[in-house]
Image (tube, coloured by chain):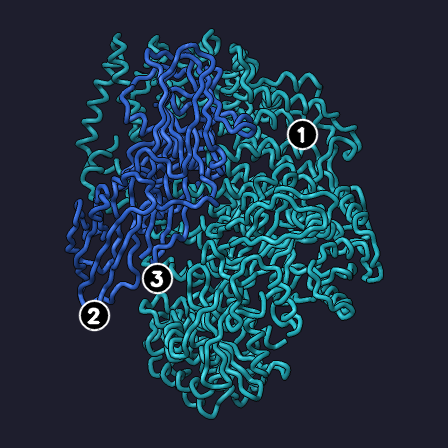
Amino acid sequence: MYTKFKLFSPQKMIHSLFLINCSGDIFLEKHWKSVVSQSVCDYFFEAQEKAADVENVPPVISTPHHYLISIYRDKLFFVSVIQTEVPPLFVIEFLHRVADTFQDYFGSSNVGDTLPTGQLSNIPWRRAGVKYTNNEAYFDVVEEIDAIIDKSGSTVFAEIQGVIDACIKLSGMPDLSLSFMNPRLLDDVSFHPCIRFKRWESERVLSFIPPDGNFRLISYRVSSQNLVAIPVYVKHSISFKENSSCGRFDITIGPKQNMGKTIEGITVTVHMPKVVLNMNLTPTQGSYTFDPVTKVLTWDVGKITPQKLPSLKGLVNLQSGAPKPEENPSLNIQFKIQQLAISGLKVNRLDMYGEKYKPFKGVKYVTKAGKFQVRT
Amino acid sequence: MSAAPAYGEDKGGSAGPGEPEYGHDPASGGIFSSDYKRHDDLKEMLDTNKDSLKLEAMKRIVAMIARGKNASDLFPAVVKNVACKNIEVKKLVYVYLVRYAEEQQDLALLSISTFQRGLKDPNQLIRASALRVLSSIRVPIIVPIMMLAIKEAASDMSPYVRKTAAHAIPKLYSLDSDQKDQLIEVIEKLLADKTTLVAGSVVMAFEEVCPERIDLIHKNYRKLCNLLIDVEEWGQVVIISMLTRYARTQFLSPTQNESLLEENPEKAFYGSEEDEAKGPGSEEAATSTVPTRKPYVMDPDHRLLLRNTKPLLQSRSAAVVMAVAQLYFHLAPKAEVGVIAKALVRLLRSHSEVQYVVLQNVATMSIKRRGMFEPYLKSFYIRSTDPTQIKILKLEVLTNLANETNIPTVLREFQTYIRSMDKDFVAATIQAIGRCATNIGRVRDTCLNGLVQLLSNRDELVVAESVVVIKKLLQMQPAQHGEIIKHLAKLTDNIQVPMARASILWLIGEYCEHIPKIAPDVLRKMAKSFTAEEDIVKLQVINLAAKLYLTNSKQTKLLTQYVLSLAKYDQNYDIRDRARFTRQLIVPSEQGGALSRHAKKLFLAPKPAPVLESSFKDRDHFQLGSLSHLLNAKATGYQELPDWPEEAPDPSVRNVEEEDLSLIETHVGLLGEYTEVPEWTKCSNREKRKEKEKPFYSDSEGESGPTESADSDPESESASDSKSSGESGSGESSSESDSEDQEEEKGRSSESEQSEEEGGKRKTKNRKKVAEGQGDGSSSDEGSDSSSSSSESERTSETEEEQVEPASWRKKTPPSGKSAPVAKEISLLDLEDFTPPSVQPVSPPTIVSTSLATDLEGLTLTNSPLVPSLLSPASGAGRQELLHRVAGEGLAVDYTFSRQPFSGDPHMVSVHIHFSNSSETPIKGLHVGTPKLPAGLSIQEFPEIESLAPGESATAVMGINFCDSTQAANFQLCTQTRQFYVSIQPPVGELMAPVFMSENEFKKEQGKLTGMSEITEKLTLPDSCRSDHVVVQKVTTVANLGRVPCGTSDEYRFAGRTLTSGSLVLLTLDARPSGAAQLTVNSEKMVIGTMLVKDVVQALTQ
């Protein structure tokens, strides 16, 4: 793990790094320059206390002698100590890469790496001498729909964000070109460093020598003037009675523009107002939970069968005496549609140069809900 | 030594995160001793000969270090293993050494010889790692050894080792800053390195050791620019940031020509976009403002930097994108900055910390360059799941982006936010509404009404915040709002939040003359509860008492004295002080009346209204993306961004020998072994060659070399990217142009109108050009050969930069005023095809409208009959120009709002487009190209017109769904050979369609739309406008509404629905015979309502 960090140079700007778990224990520290006492984290804890919840801890904290830049990932705080001017995003980006590396590292079991070979390869992102018996290249086109739907069901905001994740297991130094049927759909693209920008600019072809293994090839946004198909609709009626300790809750989900595919993996999450004590609901399908502490209602719906639309209805128990909540909570919806890229993006072909063998190629499409919110 | 595990176990949750100073606690001694025992077996393991045991021991030790435990007592045992053959053990020993060498310097010296040996190892990896560890050992005594090692490594044949040498430089510098001079030498050497691997690291060293030695960069500047794209991401950030500073010292400001337009950033931003669509006129306006200055020519090196950084906006690294964004913000000509918006908006999908930083920067940028982010308005909409700190930043951005055009949408969003459960956020929203209200006069009353409604909100915090904001708004125009102040006065009974109470009391005191009856009563109540009030409220009670005493002493004398007496014995000394001070001031005493004579002046002085402005204003004096910018304070080590120089320093310092460029290592080298050279490397090669071919300017003459001008460049360079952002605002910016000009134009046009009464079928298009040629306004040149003058004007626009013309020669494009959002161009000189001036949708003379109506009827393609009672005589606004015939190279395009339902989609506004071909050749394949529309808007294109013969005209119908907003629809009009960017902005009255309604229905619906949805305005009708016929006609000209039958004669009612959402728009005009009238509009689209009222009032009163 140590050697992996050596690849990065930001450490030259970061003094120290502390890892803190959610109960406030500093369980790991690393100093790149002189040692900074753990007590510097007190300023962080102070800010954390003030922020009420973890999401609102300011990422940059100024202390008398240092600056603390932190991120929150997987229930851990990564707190870095900085002494001089540095672009904050530089540090934040680095911390996220560290977190990514942790994830990779603890996910796999290749402890005891030998010295890294990456930096000696002519191509910084690919090690030399890769060998596979089965040569395969898989691409996952994953699109997410971000949307805000207003009370009346009309779309306030919707856009499609997509990524192409690749899993490349090819021997030697393959040089790949991936082309699309409709590349013009991609409005704003960000690239893995392996991609040749000029080639994309001139021909709209992704040309690259891939890193070995799993990586994100591109992220993209679909141009905004294309209307976004919203695959589901939600009928909702949530009401709280004045001067009464109960309210009604009734939501139904149905398919809308789903391109004839099955919508599955539907989950509805609702942050109910604080005055809600409990909920007695009956789902026609799937199961629901309500956490009376966090006031989060989660309904695991499964997939929609158009013959019988899933619904969840019942009573809401409110704290008696408290005024009725003013706002109805918004519904956060998750879903998944297999074998469909909602934007209509299609991979045309994948060509390989530089190596003689014939690789096995595959493309998979999936559409998911991103930040999909229905205001009620 | 530490007890961390135990500590971790018995701590429940995050109970006490503030007490991590543990380990010295005697209670944890048990664990202490077991640690010692464990250390003993570690020592044993390290002493064995088995590598596996050593490795195990080292792993455990490194784990201890990582957990912050002290393992220093193991130093002797560990250091022995530095020469261990096993590379895994060795690595871990290095980790240990780096951590503890500083504490155990003497022992650490034992290991130095091992590293020195390592520096000579044939394996580059071992050389590098030896140098890395050696330079990480912070022992002053080895400084000379380190220096030597760095110098040697800097000339190592392996770039990897050279990179490590660059990394070692700042470490040595921080250990001993006396070595600076020697280190600079090494940096200079490494800066000349041509590998991408070294570039980032050496610039980082440069930034830390000698950022002031900008002269070291000159010779390497072009190389760094060219290498940039292949440098690893971290290096890119550092290089870009350094080059930003460099450019600020070496090049001239690309915005100097635009500096006079600084006041109106939006206009400046769109300036050059407009040129494309509107032809030469506006461009001239921009340059004519600085007629005396030497035309600005961008240094090719400056251009090189901009060009080579632009692709990095596509980087996956947020830090790189931000770095490029700040570079463009600080260095690019205004017209090019727009390209960064899209990339920054993309980062908003990233982790919340990234969002936080990006939003801070966007907030700063959006103040200076609002237009840039306007197309992405909706990307800043807030979700209930966003963390509060993100919500508040997004709100800041939304507020900065709000303008006359989008304020309807923004306010509608804000209405949703007000009901949020997150009360901090609600409070911030109310503040934001306050800021919108101050910035955009048109919606001030709407906002104020909305805020007043919030006063009956159940949540006290909401009420309190509203009071505070209302106070600020009222201060701007107190006289009109006696009612609101009264309402607030009543609230003192209920509202408990001190800040709000204090605000109300201050308002009552300040404007007590507006509420002479209520004010003393409030004081009475406050006197009663005085002792129970918060301090801040007490101070305001004293303040109120003093003011009332001065204005109305008869009623309040006793009360005031009572309050002052209470205050005199208050626990708080501030209050006691204030009471004493006030008493002396207002109550005339025997000895000193000098002050009390001026008491009125002191207390009742007019106070300036507070300015509600963004906290991000002027933050851009910090380099964007920097820590200092984020903190809004200078961080240690922050390098100020220098101001542009007045005169450009000698550009020849960057010249290098030709061969240097060709030697630059690129990916060609990397890929050398492949038979096929990939396309992109060819490209980059080609470009480099091109770069070389360019004659590097003859030293002294900047202009004679290959030059690019800031003004002309965006077309070629960034047009495609910034198109969308540019166009959406162009309609607006034109409407904001100089009003003086407009008046002049109007005067002139009316002059010529009188002489010509024929309502021409074709509208003239070349007025712009003519105005330009005849700047002095003489309208005698009727017979001017239009074709020759058109070609002349084209030439003018092309050769813009070279010509320095007297400003008077160039006339601005005649702009249209705000009151008439639709631009209208009238011919001054081509009298033969002159159109009646139905410019203002507001009040065209009756005759004109009628003639226009017949005119239009003749033109319409569809046969759907007009409903005379329902539809206005014709469209509200006459023909508008879409494309001038000069700009269109002979193709002239006008449009009218036909007010007929659009057949394809009932939500669309039907627009008739009239084409006429005044060129010599037929125009083929007329169609609409890809529209770049703000989200929500959509266009139903007209069927392609295959050919338009010279002199012929044609009409087509297209539908536009404006989404109930007055945003402009921008699209391209394409012919076979050309594309024109055009824009249609609807007057608010065209966004609706009439509905039939009975009087009862009308009243019922009106009853549902009160409160915030009701906008009322008083007006006086001029004599000319008192007859039924005229009133109805004027209203229907402005708005596409249907008349509702009405019982009483003085009342006029009109009803319609907005096209997209179908929201009702009800308009009532209550006209007294005296001429006094009241106009009421009820609509849930309150902004449409507000705009409509304004338009109708203007129409009726003119």
Check if mark 3's residue and mark 1's residue have beta carbons within 8 Å. Answer: no
Query: Chain B drawn in what color?
Result: cyan
Q: Is residue B919 above or below residue B451?
A: above
Q: Secondary structure at mark 3?
A: loop
Q: Quadrant of the N terminus of chain B?
A: top left
**Both labels 2 and 1 in a single chain:** no
Give the alpha-carbon distance from disc 3 to disc 1, as whole Å. 58 Å
Q: Residue at x 66, y 46 (%)?
A: B948
Using the rendered image of the protein, determine whether residue B253 is visible from the camera's viewpoint: no
Give the alpha-carbon distance from disc 2 to disc 1, as whole Å. 76 Å
Check if mark 2's residue and mark 1's residue have beta carbons within 8 Å. Answer: no
Which of the two discs, 2 and 1, sits closer to the camera?
A: 2
The x and y percentages for residue A125 are 44, 21
User: Label 3: few (<14), some or many (≥20) within 10 Å?
Assistant: some
Q: Quadrant of the C terminus of chain B?
A: bottom right
Camera-side residue of B1053 and B36: B1053
Disc 2 marks which amino acid? Asn
Q: Secondary structure at mark 1?
A: helix
Q: Residue at x 62, y 82 (%)?
A: B1022
**Both labels 3 and 1 in a single chain:** yes
Camera-side residue of B326 and B1008: B1008
Q: Is residue B318 above or below residue B186?
A: below
> Total of numbered circles in the picture?
3
Which residue is disc 2 drawn over? Answer: A243
**Chain painted in blue in the figure:** A
Q: Residue at x 80, y 44 (%)?
A: B803
Q: Residue at x 49, y 57 (%)?
A: B902
Which residue is disc 3 drawn over? Answer: B419
Quadrant hosting residue A342 = top left
Q: Is residue A374 above or below residue B847?
A: above
Which residue is disc 1 drawn over? Answer: B215
User: Label 2: few (<14), some or many (≥20) within 10 Å?
Assistant: few
